Image: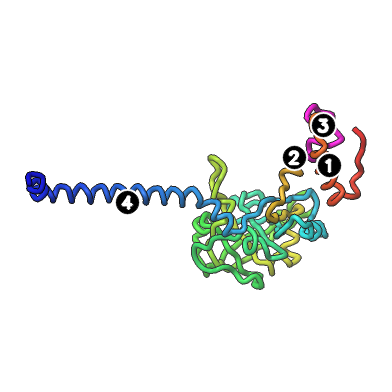
Amino acid sequence: MRLRAELRQQWRGWLALAVLLGLIGGIALTAAAGARRTDTAYPRFLRASHAADLLVTPARSGFRGYFRALARLPEVSSLAPAMFLQMSLPGSGASPFSGMVVQASPFGGEGVSVDRVKVLAGRSFNPADPKAVMINQQLADRAHLRPGGTLYLIGYPQRGPTPDIAHAERLAFRVSAIVVFDDQIVSAAGERPQPWLLLSQAFARTRQAASFNPAGGGASVLLRPGADAAAFAMVGGILTPFFETRLRDAARGHANLVAYCDRMMDRYYPDFERQAA
């Protein structure tokens, strides 16, 4: 009877305590779920953006057949070649070495099927429009632009080993969207985000675009599940016949490593001359 009476008198306190415990438990569960979502946010972003596993940058132009041959390798799921163009904003300090990243993909994959951009405002560009461009927030802030605005640029043709500043060309593009490029999600320590833009496939196929491309370009490569480029690169580097090292001698004592490297060399580099050390 006494217990029943005490419960009647203190029921409000017990109810408050139960509600408080429920709230604490709910907060803990919510925090745990939030932590799990945070922990998986970057991997989920990589999957959604079809982030490349490798960036291949040949010393010479890869647009003369090399990138197409690379795309035919059985380990390659998707490949998006891109040119890196010498361009800058007009005004004081304009230079082909301005630090602005300017990409254009002749095959149309970069930023669309591989390393997909995240659109913050506007809409993804029409790849058939040579005047369309997508820019990041840093460039939008610097040039005071929003979707629908006009981006003015200066392009520098490559003449021999150096850019021809005397014959720089003025260009204008329409901003389709402000986006985030996947390389900007995780920056190197202390590195400030650069102004970045992606020009359309239609522009990338013009002679004008090719004239602004000083190097061989690069290809973002998405590998098929199970393919391990790093393993081959590491084993191939260790087993190179051109340098005598203790690591090479140790690796050659493992028949499975030697056989794996030989299989990869025979499949992908059949004409490579295996010279004796």
Which x, y percent locates residue 155? 68, 59
Question: Crowding near pointer 1: few (<14 within 10 Å), some, many (20+)?
Answer: few
State the separation of the CA atoms marked 4 and 1. Answer: 56 Å
Asked if disc 2 and disc 3 are in contact, CB closer than 8 Å, the reply is no
Instruction: State the image coordinates of residue 106 (x, y, percent, origin top left).
Output: 72, 64
Picture disc at residue 253: 3
Mark 4 or 2, nearer chain start: 4
Number of callouts in the render?
4
Label 4 crowding class (10 Å Cα cut-off): few <14, some 14-19, many 20+? few
Residue position marked by numbered label 2 in the rendering: 234
Q: Residue at x 68, y 54 (%)?
A: 225
Q: Give the residue pinned by disc 4.
A: 26
Residue range (magenta): 233-248
What quarter of the picture does the C terminus occupy? Answer: top right
* Labels 4 and 1: the sequence-earlier one: 4
Q: Residue flagged by tag 4: what amino acid is it?
A: Gly
**Residue 1 located left or right of residue 54:** left
Mark 4 or mark 2, whichever is nearer to me: 4
Query: Which mark sits nearer the N-terminus, 2 or 3?
Result: 2
Badge 3 local density, few (<14 within 10 Å), some, or many (20+)? few
Q: Quadrant of residue 192?
A: top right
SS under mark 2: helix
Circle 1 sits in a helix, a strand or a loop, which is it? helix
